[in-house]
Image (cartoon, rainbow, N blue to C red):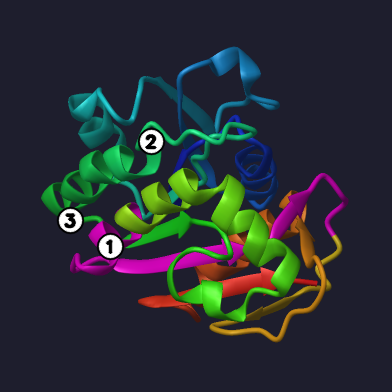
Amino acid sequence: MNILVFGATGGTGRHLVKQALDHGHTITAFVRKPEALPVGGERLRVVIGDATRDHLKVTEAVRGQDVVISTLGRRNSFKSHHLIERSMQAIVPAMQCERVQRLILVSAFGVGATHRDAPMVPRIMYRVLLKDIFADKRAAENLVASSNLDWTIVYPVLLTDGPMTGAYRVGERLELHGLPKISRADVAHFIHAEIGKCAFVRKVAVISY
């Protein structure tokens, strides 16, 4: 399967690229800094560009893909600079133009309707620290959800650098308490599984231990 990954050098993206390559897929990594990729090989194609600006490169990268995945994020910054919204403004039209239907977007638990299920402590954190980041993600989600693509929006809870366990819960809604966590490796594991299962097409997927 041909898979295009935006955010391939980020915490979740790096795990996803490695897991997908290990399972025999052909990966196109759309990155700004190719030296940050953890792996190489003949089944890894690298496109250097900025998803918010290089619209022609985005379209060229989308061409011929079976699945497009965005794990883009601002890492430790509290300022979004509208990264996710602007990237979706390029990615969604490119997919429509190239007739590539399957899109998986990694967002964050607490964005949009998932805020209603957030425990008290993270809910305060979302409101105080992540208001701008979450507004950007919500705007991007609106673009995706209003498209005709076969999208899945993934909502991981607090991300950690723990190992892949495969022992996590996924659902459109989950009962959560305290400060729920999930490793980036397990988020990547779910995304890779969803590529084949298509259990959450045009649905959201909350993931947590």
| Tag shown at residue 171 | none
- The image position of residue 115, as x and y in percent, is 54, 72
Q: Is residue 146 above or below residue 176?
A: above
Q: Is residue 12 left or right of 80 when viewed as pictured?
A: right
Q: CA distance from mark 1 to mark 3?
A: 20 Å
Q: Position of residue 63 (x, y in %)?
A: 24, 41
Boundaries of the magenta span = 140-164
Q: Say whether disc 1 or disc 3 marks the residue closer to the N-terminus.
A: 3
Q: Name the residue that disc number 2 marks.
A: 83
Question: Would you name the residue on which mark 1 appears?
Answer: 142
Q: Earlier in the sequence, mark 2 or mark 3?
A: 2
Dot 2: what SS?
A: helix
Earlier in the chain: of badge 2 and badge 1, it is 2
Question: Callout 2: 10 Å neighbours few (<14), some, many (20+)?
Answer: some
Can residue 161 be found in the magenta stretch?
yes
Q: Residue at x 38, y 31 (%)?
A: 81
SS at circle 3 = loop
The one of 69 and 108 positioned closer to us in this rendering:
108
Q: CA distance from mark 2 to mark 3?
A: 24 Å
Secondary structure category for the residue under label 1: helix
Would residue 179 appear left or right of 110 to someone viewing this image?
right
Q: Residue tagged by mark 3?
A: 99
Q: Residue at x 70, y 86 (%)?
A: 175
Looking at the figure, which quarter contains the C terminus? bottom right
Q: Is residue 181 above or below residue 32?
A: below
Q: Quadrant of residue 176?
A: bottom right
Q: Amino acid at mark 3?
A: Arg
- In this view, the residue in front, 75 or 24, is 75
Determine if the magenta segment contains residue 33: no
Q: Is residue 62 visible?
A: no
Q: Give x and y (percent) for residue 190.
A: 65, 65
Asked if residue 105 is positioned above or below residue 71 in the image, the reply reads below
